Image (cartoon, rainbow, N blue to C red):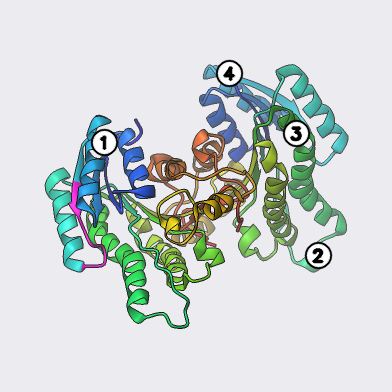
């Protein structure tokens, strides 16, 4: 029986690459995204490559939407083997005194609360199976901080600690929980708003001499679903070309 | 087979985790130089590699001795012509309280565990630079992070390996070489048996969130990941394979 992977933010650069990687490995992929059109594009790519995928629209900050979606996925597919929480974003770059409470809440909720809500609904499904892999997405900024991104940095650091805690809670059920922390990655969203000179400057600081590709991240996510990572839980995988070595 | 055509050197490859790594690399098609102080045991591992259908080469080496490491490098290039993967696993695990510790015990631990990383990496980096690719993977330890009573030099050497890995990763990244560490949790090997009863050991080994006793083979998956193309953008990291026994 094919494994089932539920991927939030599946229409984005990293989420899409993760979805394609899981599908290429034979998993049935359920992509969710706030932007249904973006998820639909990735679903189409997977289907065209001979994979199995479904695209759903969900706002991960809304508990009722999350609950209904997870129940629907369980009903239709019978199981959830992999949950990759990739929905997120920094959205704003501004000084703390300029952040409104609503903006702060928006960033923290999409990244951290969304991760919590998804885990809360999917963990019981995995507990019944006595197996599962949960992969959360942090950022190197969750370790180093990033000026003008206070809520994003805080939320990503929060995801790392949340992951460790959940890993301890779910270990007796055979469920592994880990975090992947991307560094600068060439996603359409990032590349769209970054001037070439900024990219070049950043590139020069990366020991591996290049910015990350979504596929680099996808390989780390995929590794953490395989039997080769059976004994890794509560950890943070930094995929950043050596930019940050905590 | 993910490592077909690759050449790997595994120091400390004759037993325990090193042996499991050597065989794991061989199973994926790599040719493996089994480098160890104990040549007889290295030869046994080479026989096992041959039985897996790949080639191996036994090399007697003291990783804390410059000329010995140089011979290892020469033997590797003579036999296989290149090196793609270096696994620095050779190490000693010597027990003493700090108060009253003799200097020789300190020096030997630091020289073998940390100095061996330096000498072996220095010996193989130039050829990796020339081919614009390479993987260096050092076996550190969870003890680097949480310490261990009566094993201060071991803890210091393993933490120092992580620092070394980060620095080397920055030096060689532009040449397509990644450098990472694995931090194994306490495992069912000969090492901890030097100072614990069987009962104490098994109780300790099971005492992790997953309740699993780590065996040498359990670290191979992470090594194969870091050694392969999939991890080409991961460098300077210390990967904890410890059943969740600590999380940093």
Look at the image and say whether residue B214 sits in the magenta stretch. Answer: no
Residue B227 in the image, given as x and y percentages of width and height: 38, 44
Q: Earlier in the sequence, mark 3 or mark 4?
A: 4
Q: Indicate the secondary structure of the residue bearing disc 4.
A: helix
- Near mark 3 (Cα within 10 A), the count class, few <14, some 14-19 or many ≥20, is many
For the record, the magenta segment spans B58-65
- Near mark 4 (Cα within 10 A), the count class, few <14, some 14-19 or many ≥20, is some
Residue B32 in the image, given as x and y percentages of width and height: 25, 43
- The residue pinned by badge 3 equals A122
Q: Nearer the viewer, mark 3 or mark 1?
A: 1
Q: Nearer the viewer, mark 2 or mark 4?
A: 4
Q: Indicate the secondary structure of the residue bearing disc 3.
A: helix
Look at the image and say whether residue B59 sits in the magenta stretch. Answer: yes
* Residue drawn at the location 52% of the way across and 40% of the way down: A229
Residue B48, disc: 1
Which chain is home to disc 1? B
- The residue pinned by badge 2 equals A98
Examine the rendering and report whether any part of residue B28 can be seen: no
Locate residue A71 relative to residue B102 in the image: left or right: right
Which chain is home to disc 4? A
Residue A47, disc: 4
Residue A134 in the image, given as x and y percentages of width and height: 66, 39
């Amino acid at each position: 029986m094919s494994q089932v992977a539920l991927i939030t933010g599946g229409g984005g650069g990293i989420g899409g690459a993760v979805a394609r990687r899981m599908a290429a490995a034979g998993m049935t992929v359920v992509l969710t995204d706030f932007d249904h059109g973006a998820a639909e594009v990735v679903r189409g790519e997977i289907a065209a490559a001979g994979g199995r995928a479904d695209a759903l629209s969900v706002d991960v900050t809304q508990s009722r939407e999350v609950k209904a979606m997870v129940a629907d996925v369980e009903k239709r597919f019978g199981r959830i083997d992999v949950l990759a929480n990739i929905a997120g974003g920094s959205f704003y770059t501004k000084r703390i005194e300029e952040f409104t409470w609503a903006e702060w809440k928006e960033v923290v909720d999409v990244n951290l609360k969304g991760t919590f809500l998804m885990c809360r609904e999917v963990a019981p499904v995995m507990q019944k199976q006595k197996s599962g892999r949960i992969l959360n997405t942090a950022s190197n900024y969750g370790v180093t901080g990033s000026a003008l991104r206070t809520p994003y940095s805080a939320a990503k650091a929060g995801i790392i600690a949340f992951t460790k805690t959940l890993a301890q809670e779910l270990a007796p059920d055979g469920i592994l929980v880990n975090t992947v922390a991307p560094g600068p990655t060439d996603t359409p969203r990032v590349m769209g708003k970054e001037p070439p000179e900024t990219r070049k400057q950043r590139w020069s600081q990366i020991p591996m001499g290049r910015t990350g590709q979504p596929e680099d991240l996808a390989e780390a996510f995929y590794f953490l679903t395989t039997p080769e990572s059976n004994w890794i839980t509560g950890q943070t995988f930094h995929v950043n070309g050596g930019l940050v070595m905590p | 087979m993910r490592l077909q055509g690759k050449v790997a050197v595994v120091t400390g490859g004759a037993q325990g985790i090193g042996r499991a790594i050597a065989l794991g690399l061989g199973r994926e098609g790599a040719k493996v130089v089994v480098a160890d102080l104990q040549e007889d045991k290295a030869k046994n591992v080479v026989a096992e590699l041959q039985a897996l259908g790949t080639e191996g080469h036994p090399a007697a080496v003291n990783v804390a001795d410059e000329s010995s490491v140089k011979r290892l490098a020469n033997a590797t290039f003579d036999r296989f012509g290149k090196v793609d993967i270096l696994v620095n696993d050779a190490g000693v695990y010597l027990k003493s309280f700090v108060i009253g510790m003799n200097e020789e015990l300190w020096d030997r631990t630091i020289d073998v565990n940390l100095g061996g990383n330096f000498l072996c990496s220095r010996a193989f980096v130039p050829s990796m630079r020339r081919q614009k690719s390479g993987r260096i993977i050092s076996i550190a330890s969870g003890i680097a992070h949480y310490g261990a009573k009566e094993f201060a030099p071991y803890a210091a050497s393993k933490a120092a390996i992580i620092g070394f890995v980060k620095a080397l990763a920055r030096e060689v990244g532009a040449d397509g070489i990644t450098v990472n560490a694995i931090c194994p949790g306490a495992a069912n090997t000969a090492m901890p048996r030097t100072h614990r009863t069987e009962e104490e050991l098994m109780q300790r080994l099971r005492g992790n969130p997953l309740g699993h006793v780590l065996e040498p083979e359990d670290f191979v998956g992470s090594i194969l990941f870091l050694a392969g193309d999939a991890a080409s953008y991961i460098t300077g990291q210390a990967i904890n394979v410890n059943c969740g026994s600590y999380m940093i």
